[in-house]
Image: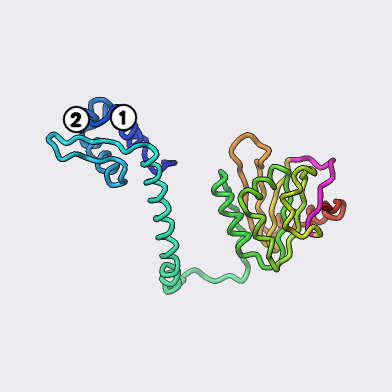
Amino acid sequence: MQYGLTSNQSKVFIYLGKYGAKTAPEVCKALKLPRTETYHLLSALQNKGIVSATFQHPIQFTASPLNKAIWILVNAEKERVKSLEHMEKGLSELWDNIPTFDSLHDEVEEKFQMLQGANQIQSKITEMTDNFKDEFLILGSEKDYIKLYHGEFLESFVKSKQQFRLLSACSDKTTYIFDNLERKNIKKLDKDIQNHLCFILKDDSELLFFTKNANSTTEPFAMWTNSKSLVYSMKLLFESLWTNSKNIHL
């Protein structure tokens, strides 16, 4: 489902793309798929716009060229996201009009959320940078900051009126990623600090802690939490390291 197609939809598309125009029975026989499912798969691929059918009898199906199919799928996904954005206001108003039956608590419930993969983690970082009010703190390795730089997350601090501080293990070769930022808000970690630690703190209220950061060869994992004790502990660690770290100079 990574590219918007199921496993069997992908098989049918590849088969048509490599073998040319085929009838439904030919597809069914070649891929050893149930007849009814084959018709459903061909119909679904037609609806996605990446398979077309002829008017002749028996009907033959052909796959679009791969580059065109990718373009169609990408644009369909863009339109889906755009549609969801347009619906946000109406859905929010509808949600707010539904009565809340849960009892209200003055104390915020502590939560944990495990995040797997770059997309989920980037989405959470964007959410945190978009609505922080007081101070944003980041500690990370050189590779972590390079990923943040290329993901344009550091751009949010260029004109930000809110406070931010960055602790980095970057070498002199990569300090260019901070060129547009106030250098007084950036310090370089001591060489003795191991290069495996990466976390983000927002407003003394939220923590994003990487269990596998950019130095790992496998898919990144991170944990988000609003746990007061964990947030406080990591804030103490950040402040301790900040005190013992040196400013990055031009």
Q: What is the quadrant of the N terminus in the image?
A: top left
Taking depth in this image into account, of 170 and 242 the one nearest to the observer is 170
Q: In which quarter of the view is residue 79 placed?
A: bottom left
Q: Residue furthest left?
A: 57
Numbered badge on residue 186:
none
Instruction: Tell me what residue is drawn at x 68 percent, y 65 percent.
Output: 159
Q: Amino acid at mark 1?
A: Tyr
Q: Earlier along the polypeptide chain: callout 1 or callout 2?
A: 1
Q: Along the line of sight, which residue is nearer the eye, 177 or 206?
A: 177
Q: Indicate which disc residue 25 carries.
A: 2
Which image quarter: residue 124?
A: bottom right
* Residue 179 belongs to the span the image colors magenta: no
Q: Quadrant of residue 70?
A: top left
Give the vertical position of 161 relative to 62 (above or below).
below
Q: Position of residue 210 (x, y in %)?
A: 66, 46
Residue drawn at x 43%, y 56% as measured from the top left: 81
Q: Nearer the viewer, mark 1 or mark 2?
A: 1
Disc 2 is placed on an element classified as: helix
Which region is colored magenta?
A: 185-195
Residue 125 position in % (x across, y down):
61, 54
At numbered mark 1, what does the secondary structure look like: helix, strand or loop? helix
- Residue named by callout 1: 15
Q: Main secondary structure of the magenta part?
A: loop
Vertical order, 105 against 212 (above or below)? below
Q: Tell me if 61 is positioned left or right of 188 in this view.
A: left
Residues at discs 1 and 2 in contact (Cβ within 8 Å) = no
Q: Magenta stretch: residue 187 in it?
A: yes
The amino acid type of the residue labelled 2 equals Pro
Question: What is the x, y in percent for residue 234?
Answer: 75, 54
- Residue at 42 percent across and 74 percent down: it is 97
